[in-house]
Amino acid sequence: MHYDFDTITERRGTNAIKFDLAKRRGKPEDALPLWVADMDFPTAPEILEELHKKVNHGIFGYSACDESFFEAVKKWQKEEHNFDFERREVVTTPGVVFAISCAVRAFSKEGEGVIIQPPVYYPFKNMVEKNGRVVVENPLFEKDGKWHINFDDLEQKIEESKARLLIFCSPHNPVGRVWTKEELLRVAQICEKHNVIVFSDEIHNDFVIPPNQHTVFSTISPWAAEHSVVSTAASKTFNLAGLQFSVNFIKNPTIRAQFRTELDKTGYDEPSIMGLVATKAAYEFGKPWLNALRSHLNENLTFLRSFLKEKLPFVRLIEPEGTYLIWLDFSKCGKSDEEIEEIILKKAKLWLDRGTMFGKEGAFYQRINIATPKKILEDALTRLATAFS
């Protein structure tokens, strides 16, 4: 089947935060948005077909995951990520950020430290602070165009703060790293030494650029399997974020019970029926569409790489190992971080994610979402080139 990633779909006026909240967020209403991590394509037609069947059935009552759902998830995780699990280990939530909030309450106390690794997806910090905990930062560092974990600092921060929870991003958003088995093992060894539970956000795990390979954190060692929560969803992979559905794998029954206790306190009980249907359909029928999408994203990345080299040579591309969120370094353009943001927003009329929203380490960086038709990406890059010329 031919899948269309080139037709531009009008998203304004559809309650899309990516397009419809510009004025509310203090952005120009005519700014082209390539910021938040959703895609500008309809989801796979195979998923839409299953959703239409549910709509035509017409009843949207309380729902639960059945055996066929678990088999679909199990098959996908095994084939795509060499990961196996038992049904009892699965806990569904309305999203990964929701799950992070539950984990913060389950595995730390008010006033205690929780470790994050900036520059990182900003809800990590928000969920720690809004739940009355203290953010403990173990910053990543960049060397020769690649970001790395500072393991010595990680261990020091754990010792100093007595933190018992690490919120880990794998693959990493926004720096685009796909952590190696050696890096994951080092994280696990440090956390084992200091009795730190790892919440591993693996929502971008289906977007890994060869020869890189994603490794599920809980598979890295027997200790990691028993002391982690691995959280993922079909939402980034198949553009389903608005359906509010994610899957968490928790092997250890004690840790799982602690997590469920906090989940129950929120009043969340039955999962979203449309999220459930879409996720099952994605994992059963979505692979051909995903393969075509990956090809399109690779073409967009190739175009971005060549455009920067030719028209914006002072903008440094941090070569991504995964995700469709690209990390761009503007530090050589001779402007302050504030001036760069002003030029992009007011002159280029382009809405990107400013690097500092992910932490102070993101100064002079901008994050751009390339999961869009090529014409839109070309328009965005042309605006950038014109604004900085």
Image (cartoon, rainbow, N blue to C red):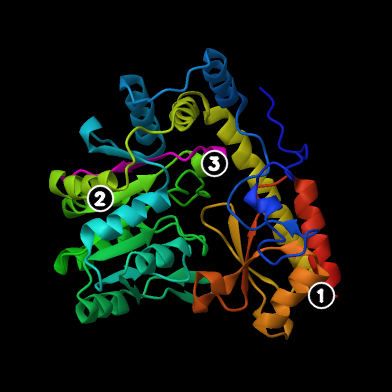
* Residue at position x 20%, y 78% in the image: 159
Rounded to the nearest whole Å, what is the CA distance between mark 3 and mark 2?
Answer: 23 Å
The mark total stands at: 3
- Place residue 14 in its image quadrant: top right
- Tell me: residue 214, above or below residue 175: above
Q: Earlier in the sequence, mark 2 or mark 1?
A: 2
**Tag 1 residue:** 388
* Residue at position x 47%, y 38% in the image: 234
Element under disc 1: helix
Rounded to the nearest whole Å, what is the CA distance between mark 2 and mark 1?
Answer: 49 Å
Mark 1 Cα within 10 Å, few/some/many (few <14, many 20+)?
some
Mark 3 Cα within 10 Å, few/some/many (few <14, many 20+)?
few
- The answer to whether 319 appears left or right of 168 in the picture is right
- The answer to whether 312 appears left or right of 280 in the picture is right
The label shown at residue 330 is: none
Q: Quadrant of the C terminus?
A: bottom right
Q: Earlier in the sequence, mark 3 or mark 1?
A: 3
**Tag 3 residue:** 242
Can you give x and y, in whole percent of width and height, for residue 219 in the image? 26, 47
* Magenta-highlighted residues: 238-252
Element under disc 2: helix
- The answer to whether 335 appears left or right of 116 in the picture is right
- Tell me: residue 220, above or below residue 317: above
Q: Which of 69 and 125 is in front in this view?
A: 125
Q: Nearer the viewer, residue 110 or 146?
A: 110
**Tag 2 residue:** 262
Rounded to the nearest whole Å, what is the CA distance between mark 3 and mark 1?
Answer: 35 Å
Q: Earlier in the sequence, mark 3 or mark 2?
A: 3
Res. 220 in view: no
Mark 2 Cα within 10 Å, few/some/many (few <14, many 20+)?
some
* Residue at position x 42%, y 45% in the image: 95
